[in-house]
Amino acid sequence: MTTVRLSFTTEVPASVEDVWTWSTSIRGIKLEMWPILKITFPKGMTGIDKDTTLKKPLCRCQFLLLGLIPIDMSKLTFVEFDPGHRFVEQSPLLSMRSWRHERIVTPAANGAPGAVVTDNLEFSPRFGAPMVRFFVRKFFEHRHAVLARTFARRALRAGRTDK
């Protein structure tokens, strides 16, 4: 069984609180994934919060490649949740023997303004490990690019508003 480990880190011009709110909102999750994947959530679900039950599926999610082609199904499950700072999602997926996604949001180094977002992944694909590794790496690079772009735009707008 092949186990893949990947890590991605991005610094953004936003408070830890704003980045955490984004990272745990259904809107933020969907925007990070789009247009590569569309993820479905139950109607009316707006986010993941401190009251999330650990180690039990929160909901069933479907992943649609390019928003059209069903490619995977997940029982979204959180095993650790440190509100405002860190979560670990360890969900059963059809395509994986195991999947672990940890997101950590910390203040930027040396008291500089901003926040640092780190995603640590560990997974074991059921088949095609090199192809799955490539896809997951590109997908999380995309997610971090969306994070950087989104918060840079927000900072730019806030800067214009302050003048």
Image: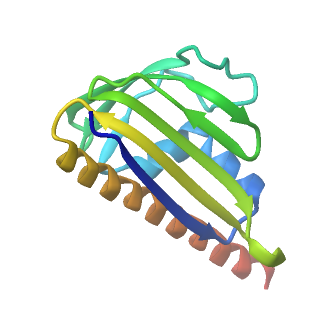
Tell me: residue 67, above or below residue 62.
below
Q: Position of residue 131 (x, y in %)?
A: 18, 48
Spot the residue most to the bottom: 163
Q: Quadrant of residue 151?
A: bottom right
Horizontally, residue 111 falls left or right of residue 20, namely: right
Looking at this view, is 158 or 95 the one in front? 95
Task: Quarter of the image for the N terminus: give it.
Answer: top left
Looking at this view, is 158 or 35 the one in front? 35
Q: Position of residue 140 (x, y in %)?
A: 40, 54
The residue drawn where x is 53% and y is 68% is 148
Q: Quadrant of residue 107?
A: bottom right
The residue drawn where x is 61% and y is 26% is 79
Task: Quarter of the image for the C terminus: give it.
Answer: bottom right
Looking at this view, is 143 or 77 the one in front? 77
Q: Position of residue 157 (x, y in %)?
A: 65, 74
Q: Position of residue 85 (x, y in %)?
A: 73, 47
